[in-house]
Image (spheres, grey):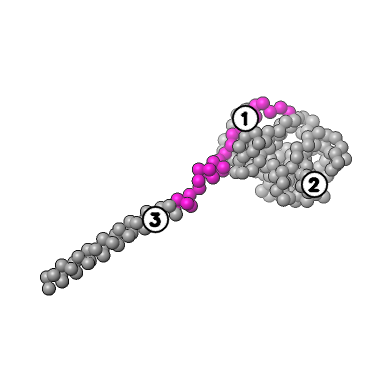
């Protein structure tokens, strides 16, 4: 009888010990699965704000984030420094009549602080996502004011060679093209006279 009591106690001890060890093992096994739900360093980096030096950008020139500097959230970003002549054309009455949404009334096309004729914080700088809003091609930068095969009265802007969509120098879409909306304006701010940060809004410390 004593031997049976010892054996019974031993079985209970082994059962309890096995349960504890098994539970601890399950925790360690679960850790790798939990970690897979955490964004990788590469993913976090891809979504991080990108600061760009614009001090050497001259009038009429465009800087391409994604070609000249790393992309922001996997998207090419364009920073165009517009000349006074370019800005004057943006408010031309005849030009506005050719646009589908000249006042950028479709929501979520740009931050509230960029809802103006220039679609920007500072008129001379356009900051745009360089992806056509039709099927995701990347339009060509065609800044010269001269007749083009795709527009005999071209005043400068962006032309998508995939399906013929056209956008002006503020990224506003023309009428009669496949693209339904204006080019997107990402959140951004001016840190100082030399730097723009893409991915942080003007409300988060614009200069």
Q: Is residue 186 magenta?
A: no
Q: Tag 1, which secondary structure?
A: strand
First reached walking from the N terminus: tag 3 or tag 2: 3
| Residue at 15% across, 71% down | 4
| Quadrant where the C terminus is found in the figure | top right
The residue pinned by badge 1 equals 53
| Residue at 41% across, 53% down | 31
| Residue at 70% across, 44% down | 131
Q: Nearer the viewer, mark 2 or mark 1?
A: 2
First reached walking from the N terminus: tag 3 or tag 1: 3
The residue pinned by badge 3 equals 29
Q: Is residue 54 magenta?
A: yes
User: Relative to residue 39, is residue 88 drawn left or right?
Assistant: right
Provide the residue span drawn in magenta.
Answer: 34-59
The residue pinned by badge 2 equals 164
First reached walking from the N terminus: tag 2 or tag 1: 1
User: Relative to residue 8, is residue 33 drawn left or right?
Assistant: right
Please provide percent x and percent y for residue 75: 64, 43
Separation (CA) of disc 3 from disc 1:
46 Å
| Mark 2 Cα-neighbour bin, 10 Å: few <14, some 14–19, many ≥20 | some
Q: Tag 2, which secondary structure?
A: loop
Q: Nearer the viewer, mark 3 or mark 1?
A: 3
| Quadrant where the N terminus is found in the figure | bottom left
């Amino acid at each position: 009888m004593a031997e049976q009591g010892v054996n019974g106690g031993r079985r209970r001890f082994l059962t309890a010990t096995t349960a504890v060890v098994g539970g601890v093992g399950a925790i360690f096994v679960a850790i790798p699965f939990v970690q897979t739900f955490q964004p990788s360093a590469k993913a976090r980096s891809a979504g991080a704000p990108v600061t760009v030096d614009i001090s050497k950008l001259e009038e009429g020139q465009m800087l391409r984030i994604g070609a000249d500097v790393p992309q922001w959230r996997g998207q090419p970003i364009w920073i165009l420094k517009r000349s006074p002549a370019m800005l004057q054309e943006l408010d031309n009455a005849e030009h506005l009549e050719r646009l589908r949404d000249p006042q950028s009334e479709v929501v979520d096309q740009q931050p509230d602080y960029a809802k103006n004729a220039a679609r920007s914080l500072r008129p001379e700088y356009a900051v745009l996502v360089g992806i056509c809003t039709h099927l995701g091609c990347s339009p060509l930068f065609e800044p010269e004011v001269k007749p083009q095969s795709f527009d005999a009265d071209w005043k400068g802007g962006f032309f998508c060679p995939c399906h013929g969509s056209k956008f002006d120098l503020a990224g506003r879409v023309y009428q009669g093209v496949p693209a339904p909306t204006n080019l997107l304006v990402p959140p951004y701010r001016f840190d100082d006279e030399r730097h723009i940060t893409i991915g942080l809004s003007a409300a988060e410390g614009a200069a």
